Image (cartoon, helix red, strand yellow):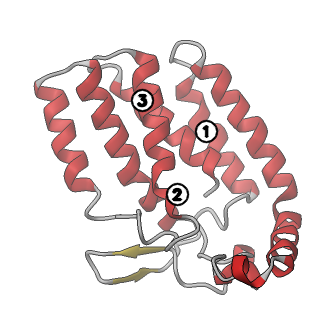
Amino acid sequence: MMAMTHALAGLVLAALAVGVGGDPVTVAAAGLAGSLFPDLDIYAGHRKSLHYPVYGWVPAGLAVALAAAVPSSTTVALATFLVAVALHPVMDIYGGGLELRPWEGRSERAVYSHYHGRWLAPKRLVPYDGSPRDLGTAVVLAVPTMTLPEPVPAFALALLTVGAVYVALRKRLAVVWSTLARALPEPVAQHVPARFFE
C-alpha cells in the first residue's frame, strides 16, 4: 500500500489511543512516525530489514500493556508508535508483491517473515500500491482521523490529496523510475534495488 495509506492507518491508531490518555497531537505524531518507520528500509532490504509481521507485535503488546497500566502522553505515544510499526507489514501482506509494476502480479514476495524464515505471498486485497482500491482504503481510514484536533484532520486531507495524485500517476511513475535508474552511473546504480531496472 502507498505511504499515505499507511500514514492514515497510524492516525487511526492515534484516534483510538487518545481515549486511554495523552496529548492527541503527540499521539498522532507517534502513530504517523510508526506507520512510516518500516519503509526506511526501502533501499536496503525493502520489506525485510525493518518489516516484522510477527515479531513486531511483541514490543507492541508490551507497550500497550504499559500504556494501559500507566497511561501518560509518553506511554500512549510509545504504544501507538509500536503498534503502527507492527501493523505496517501486515498491511503490506494484503497488498501487492514487491516489484516495480505490481499490477502485473509477477512477484510472490509481499513481506519477509523472520518468524517463518521466508517471504509471505501477497494477498492482493489491495492489488498494488497506488491502485484505486488503495485510494479507497485511504479515504475510509481518513474518516476516524477527523475526530482528532487540528492540525491532524487538515493533514489527513493533505495525505488524501497527495494519494489521489499518486494514484493518477502511479503507472507512469514506474516508467520514470525505471528510466532514471538506467541512466544512473554504475557506481550509483549498483546501490539501487534490482526491481527498479525491471
Please tell me whether mark 2 sits on a helix, a strand or a loop.
helix
The reply to whether discs 1 and 2 touch (Cβ–Cβ < 8 Å) is no
- In this rendering, would 67 be left or right of 103? left
- The residue singled out by tag 3 in the image is 14
Quadrant into which the N terminus falls:
bottom right
Q: Quadrant of residue 74?
A: top left
Tag 1 or tag 3, which sits nearer the N-term? 3
Q: CA distance from mark 3 to mark 2?
A: 19 Å
Tag 2 or tag 1, which sits nearer the N-term? 2
Q: What is the x, y in percent for residue 152?
A: 58, 21
- The residue singled out by tag 1 in the image is 140
Q: CA distance from mark 3 to mark 1?
A: 15 Å
- The residue singled out by tag 2 in the image is 39
CA neighbours of label 3 inside 10 A, class few (<14), some (14 to 19), many (20+): many
Tag 2 or tag 3, which sits nearer the N-term? 3
Q: What is the x, y in percent for residue 84?
A: 40, 45
Residue type, mark 3 in image: Ala
Q: Quadrant of residue 82?
A: top left
Question: What number is the disc on residue 159?
Answer: none
Q: Quadrant of residue 131?
A: bottom right
| Viewer-nearest residue: 135 or 83 | 83
Please tell me whether mark 1 sits on a helix, a strand or a loop.
helix
Q: Is residue 80 above or below residue 5?
A: above
